[in-house]
Amino acid sequence: MTDELLWPRLEAVIMGVVGEAALINRATRAQDVPGWNSHAMVEVILGTEEAFGFQMSSLDMESIDGVEALLAVVRRYTHEAVAR
């Protein structure tokens, strides 16, 4: 799945958690967004898993510090699913 297909879905998940007013792009880090705290991170991860139909490993969860890292995890899992 290409980024052009992944990004809108991922952006919707993030915006649903941190709020529509937040300016989110691929370079956004969690620490840059008011309200993107540890609780919000859990919600973003759960929402991402639900939206894309996979379950992250704890190592993947620990690696996520912002949007690009989250997108990289989604890319990997969706690529693996397509490859099977």
Image: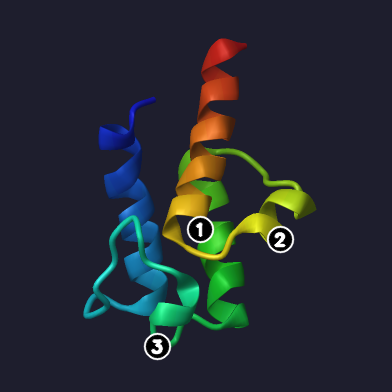
Type of the residue with mark 2 = Glu
Q: Which mark is residue 13?
A: none
Compared with residue 51, is residue 39 higher up or lower down, i.e. above or below? below
Compared with residue 19, is residue 71 higher up or lower down, i.e. above or below? above
Disc 1/disc 2 C-alpha distance (Å):
16 Å
Q: Where, by quadrant of the figure, is residue 2 drawn? A: top left
Type of the residue with mark 3 = Pro
Which residue is painted at 56% across and 65% down in the image?
65
Which residue is painted at 76% across and 51% down in the image?
59
Closer to the N terminus: mark 2 or mark 3? 3
Q: Secondary structure at mark 1?
A: helix
Q: Are marks 1 and 3 in contact (CB under 8 Å)?
A: no
Q: Secondary structure at mark 2?
A: helix
- Looking at the image, the residue that sits furthest to the right is 58
Q: Which residue is mark 1?
A: 47
Q: Which residue is mark 2?
A: 62
Left or right: residue 28 versus residue 51 is left
